[in-house]
Image: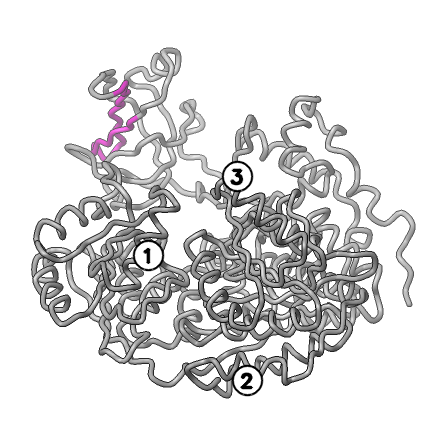
Amino acid sequence: MPAVKPEFGAQARQPISVLHGVGPAIARKLHERGIDTLQDLWLQLPVAFEDRTQIVTLDALQLGQTAQIEVRVAAVERGFRFRPMLKVTVQDESLRQLGLRFFHYSSSQASQFQVGRLLRCYGQVRLGANSFEMVHPSYRFITEDQAGVCRDRLDPVYSNIDGIGAATLGKLVRQSLQHLPPEADLELIPEALLRDSGLPGFGAALTAIHEPLPGTTLAELRTGRHPAMQRLALEELLAHHLSLRKQRLAVKAKAARRIDPPASTLEPFLAGLPYRLTAAQQRVIDDIRGDLRSGQPMLRLVQGDVGSGKTVVAALAALSTIRAGGQAALMAPTELLAEQHARTFMDWFAPLGIDTVFLAGKQTAAVRRQNLQCIADGAGMVIGTHALMQDHVQYRQLDLVMVDEQHRFGVDQRLSLRDKGEFEAHSPHQLILTATPIPRTLAMSAYADLDVSVIDELPPGRTPVQTVALANSRRDEVIARIRDYCGQGNQIYWVCTLIDESEDIQAQSAQAAFDLIAGCLPGIEVALLHSKVPPAEKSRIMRDFKDNRIQVLVATTVIEVGVDVPNASVMVIENAERLGLAQLHQLRGRVGRGSTASHCLLMYQAPLSAMARERIEVMRQTDNGFLIAEKDLELRGPGELLGTRQTGDTGYRIADLSRDASLLPEVLRLAERLMQRYPEQSDLLVARWIGSAARFAHA
């Protein structure tokens, strides 16, 4: 096995304090963003690029274009209408004029704009009151001999760090690149494995991104087609994949309690269900029972479309654990969903003599103390929100940790709950549930540490949901039809994206919709539900809706996940253009749970953007969650599916799982060979791209 040279990485590990201009204050701010070494700066990749290689005349500008112009100051106006404003009128040799508008400026800055002075500006062209304008463009004054002289390459744009501007960060990055070691000392993927790829080495790729060569186009970089982008994306995907594989090996190296109760202990539960399990549910249950009896910690993700019966599968996993003498915990992302799970499990488990404890953050002190004692005494089933993993919650023997809609939690929260079941050399079994179908390309990379089971069959009796799109201007017509539906005994969800009216966003608020609908439908019980409603009131509203004492529930997307009211047959979604495909599909899944014909009305504010129009068309054409997930990944990328902005997650710097899906087969091939033949390089790759955050790669 090739050895790693002792001096490998020494240059990369040099502290940023070796750079000119990095004193204690700057170093502290960079440290807060995880930037401590030269390598950390090398990997602060540009977030965008600007094309300042040419000058566009004012008469050639187009609305929405981002361009560089060379102009002279024609007039300066300072005013104060709603806030201070500086407007500079400029013109070029075409004699066309354009306005530069600034809302944040100093007196000294304003005094620099003197009539006749030459400057170069870069910004987006917008439509002003009388002509085109640029708002807060970047600019610099130039001399006559600099006129017409442009850069020969694209400019990288860096993100702002609190207290450190993008320009300053860019200077530090360029300075750090002067310390790049020779390619042979920088490369972590052995040459034998990369020889046939046709991609540049790591150092060359890094330089080509930070300092694009003349001739490099914006299109190459934006689409990820540039060889340097491909090279860095390949390595980053590889590092994340290796991290997940190592996480899996580390967990599987531990022991877990063998859970294999006699099948007869599960039969009373199955006999009490009003339906038979589908073949897909039975197949997934068999997967889980095999994991539980293995003696190794289960690490399984169960995917199932909306209404496919994941909760029953979770209940059987929990029941197996409880009958074997352990405890099971189910963590849900909202109190509304957690309470519904608690009621469901109580109904199922109480006849079997099993205690179910519900724990939420806003319970009274007395109820909370009683519940905490029950958990410590060994209550079999524990259900709650993130309150389940707080320090003062003590379990007697937590053998099974289940997380519903896990992408809604920060990774550190999921790990904290898992740690509750760690005892000596034993780890708890982990079961992750999601109603968000994960496309295969995403699962290959993002869930490499989990076994994946799919419930790809809906229970019999589910009625198809007819989906139609209507402009918001037809709201009165929809409300009139709602009256007819309610008269036939049906119930309706009316979902809005805002709680209250907003000056900045043109969308119907839940409060305004409630006032309108309640006023138009006298004699029909209408209720309002959103995140600001007190927990006890939320529970009462949902209970009354489920019992058909409320006919129309006006709500925000708080009801997106898990709320189950079989009699609800109509879902109206206001401003559907503001929601992504995954969220629209989740909301639509709240109806069609009974035998009544069901409808989903997507109301939109015209005119629609191209992407919004495509999303709505997909919703009209299919109710297949996996097809919808693939399209959502294509349109919006992986962020919404994986919750990449959650606390503790390790987001990608340059890779894009949708754009770079073609690299995944090569990532899998390289990962196998590296782990077998070059384990030291594997560790260094993970350290380079993920560093100390490797623990958070997955819960």
Range shown magenta:
83-101
Q: Residues within 10 Å of mark 3 (few under 14, many from 20)?
A: few
Q: Residues within 10 Å of mark 2 (few under 14, many from 20)?
A: some
- Does the magenta portion include 491? no
Q: Could you give the CA–CA distance between mark 3 and mark 2, rounded to whole angstroms?
A: 41 Å
* Residue at (22, 63) in percent of width and height: 492
Q: Which mark is residue 282?
A: 2
* Residue at (50, 45) in percent of width and height: 154
Q: Residues within 10 Å of mark 1 (few under 14, many from 20)?
A: many
| Mark in the foreground, 2 or 1 | 1
Q: Amino acid at mark 1?
A: Met
Q: Amino acid at mark 3?
A: Ala
* In-image side of 13 versus 521 (left or right): right
Does residue 572 show up?
Answer: yes
* In-image side of 199 versus 6 (left or right): left
Q: Which residue is denoted by mark 3 in the rendering?
A: 365
Which quarter of the figure is the C terminus placed in? bottom right
Q: Amino acid at mark 2?
A: Gln
* In-image side of 42 versus 497 (left or right): right
- Does the magenta portion include 94? yes
Q: Could you give the CA–CA distance between mark 2 and mark 1, rounded to whole angstroms?
A: 31 Å
